[in-house]
Amino acid sequence: MIQVKFPDGSEREFEDGITPMAIAEGISKSLAKRSLVAKVNGELWDMTRPLEGDASVELLSGKDADGLEVIRHDAAHVLAQAVQELFPGTQVTIGPVIDDGFYYDFARDEPFSSDDFEKIEKKMAEIVDRDLPINREVWEKDAAIAHFKKIGEDYKAQIIDDIIPPGEAITLYAHGDQWSDLCRGPHLPSTGRLPKAFKLMKLAGAYWRGDSNNEMLQRIYGTAWADEKQLKDHLTRIEEAEKRDHRKLGRELDLFHMQEEGKGMVFWHEKGLILWHVIEAYVRRRLEAAGYQEVRTPQVLDRKFWEQSGHWDKYRDNMFIAETAEDETLSLKPMNCPGHVQIFKFGQKSYRDLPLRMAEFGACHRYEPSGALHGLMRVRAFTQDDAHIFCREDQIEEETAAFIKLASSIHEDFGLERDYIALGTRPELRAGSDEFWDKAEAQMLNAARAAGVEPVIAEGDGAFYAPKLDFQVKDAIGREWTCGTIQLDYVLPERLNAEYVAEDGQKHRPVMLHRAVLGSLERFIGILIENVAGAFPMWLSPVQVVVATISEAADGYAEEAAAVLRKAGLRVEVDTRGEKINYKVREHSLQKIPVIAVVGAKEAEERKLALRRFGAKDQSVVGLDEAAAMLADEALPPDLKRAKG
RNA sequence: GCCGCCGUAGCUCAGUGGUAGAGCGCGUCAUUGGUAAUGACGAGGUCGUGAGUUCAAUUCUCACCGGCGGCACCA
């Protein structure tokens, strides 16, 4: 007999070898029906797998995160079986669970087409209807390899060979006697338990083992949920996200465009550039208040310069190179750091100058692979809100902590909630000794803690020369973005021979902290557009107020009112077109203008404005001067608003 | 860069082996209307580029360019 403990604290005795399924059935039929997988002593466990001794047992349904994960995992298996039934000769490779769903990578000479999806989904449903029992089988490694080789599954055989240590048993999961796959599990009791709330989403190429030197497999992505409502909600969420797409909104709101002659380059239109300027001015004020100095360094520099900085050697493939008629080879700067070191080196620096915080809205060009380009999010010409802090080693923690606070405050001002800060630790390929990395990682960790943040460790994610902290922010629909970073650097000051004179009268090497709050203006504006779905808060909106007339009789007053609002510092447009007010309200609402000020004969007479806010249906009638003062106050950037108190 | 899909008017999209259509937008005219579309008329396209097949290609084939979705990349 074995002793089983339940989550509510109760305990019961069962016969040896009892399964969670049998336990569930013993409690109630509906519980057995609902339970998809068990948690035994904290470990996920098949419902049909016998317990191996005393245990705590928890039964999970599709409502539990772990239960949903099993659903998705089984959906991947059912997909694989369906594909192999429909397309004999296709080899399976791996099929993991991902956010919102799953994928499976197949090896097949013929490409799949998304036209095949319907057929595959039908076959998947059929496999669900067959309600095949899913059985866990324990195999010995060599036997499993031989088995997969025999049935022509070379990839599977290779996975076992590479991943499983010799002597360790492995598990296969079989769908009845029709199909089986190497898998750690756990899985549902039978294919019939897979909710028919799955959908194949997209088709993509993916390298075997994620290595671009390997052959490319065909990946089929799917989504799977506990019930149809969840699936429907998910599909609705995707639609909502598409509506927020910054590329679509960028065109509709006349912010920017891109065209084929300038791949990865942005044409900023008037409204987009206003946005840019507002953001830049705001950040500039924040930097100034935080003790930064602003500089500007050359766009194009001689090859020799980049050879010295090390970029020519390590980064040449990503640089835009130019040749001159006088046989010089130049490069557009891909980064600002070497330029900043030149300014640091100009004249002599004393320890009294440190920490020296040097900022630049630095326009950089990088030749990014064409497949990497994506709207404003990944471009070839961008402007970083870059800065380098030159300091002594003992100042690293204080400077880093101060930066974390500054960056967090700025992100908040833009309405982006911080999710977590990631500490990127030593990568496999790295410069520097283990002692150096121990010290550097500890410095970054302590700095984060000093700022009241416990970073999430991102193993191996550091730069090759030092660890870094990355800011992960969350937007309004829960998507995550990396926004802001601070990286330690001992290498570049050494390479470029930066020095300062210390208290001891000797020359010493400063340390550099590379840091950015927004990352690049382009990318940040892209994130911002999607975060607010194009409806910018008053202080950022390119047009803050549209004065719209009801009839010609109000035209004169509309111009007058606009002048008063402009004088108060507002960005104002006037709409005196011969259209109905309904039409104008609709149009400016679609343009997501924060305030529409409607004026007719009545307002003109009384020197008032009828204000209608974006998203609201009602209006408030306010005197012109009062409205100007109120709106101007609302339109203040957050830092100025705080200063005003 | 790699795999797949896509490329028709400013935008969203329909369509065909015999050189093309809708809605919105745009222009003109009329309308001066009180909070999400006033009406009429009109202009607008080398059907991504180049080559091939064909009597004939926007349509079929190939290449290239670009876009999209992934993968790889993001020092």
Image (cartoon, rainbow, N blue to C red):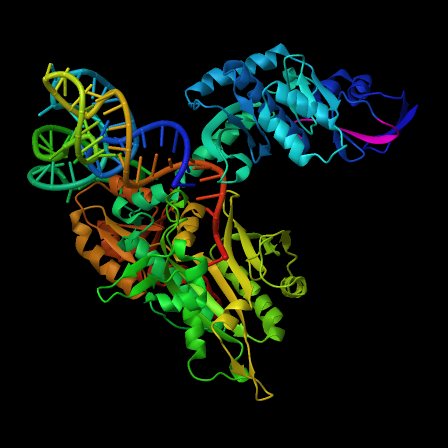
**In the picture shown, does residue A22 fall above or below A592?**
above
Question: Visible in this render: residue A36?
Answer: no
Question: Residue at 53% across / 39% down in the picture?
Answer: A210
Q: In which quarter of the image is residue A569?
A: bottom left
Q: Quadrant of residue B41?
A: top left
Residue A644 drawn in magenta = no
Question: Residue at 40% across / 53% down in the picture?
Answer: A317
Nearer to the camera, A33 or A321: A321
Whole-percent x, y for residue A611 in the image: 34, 51
Quadrant (top left/top right/bottom left/bottom right) for the N terminus of chain A: top right
The residue at the far right in this view is A1
Whole-percent x, y for residue A71 in the image: 63, 26
Nearer to the camera, A86 or A202: A86
Whole-percent x, y for residue A80 in the image: 56, 21
The residue at the far top in this view is A130
Q: In which quarter of the image is residue A633?
A: bottom left
Looking at the image, residue A190 sits to the left or right of residue A202; the answer is: right
Whole-percent x, y for residue A144 in the image: 69, 24
**In the picture shown, does residue A269 fall above or below A178?**
below
The residue segment tinted magenta is: A52-64
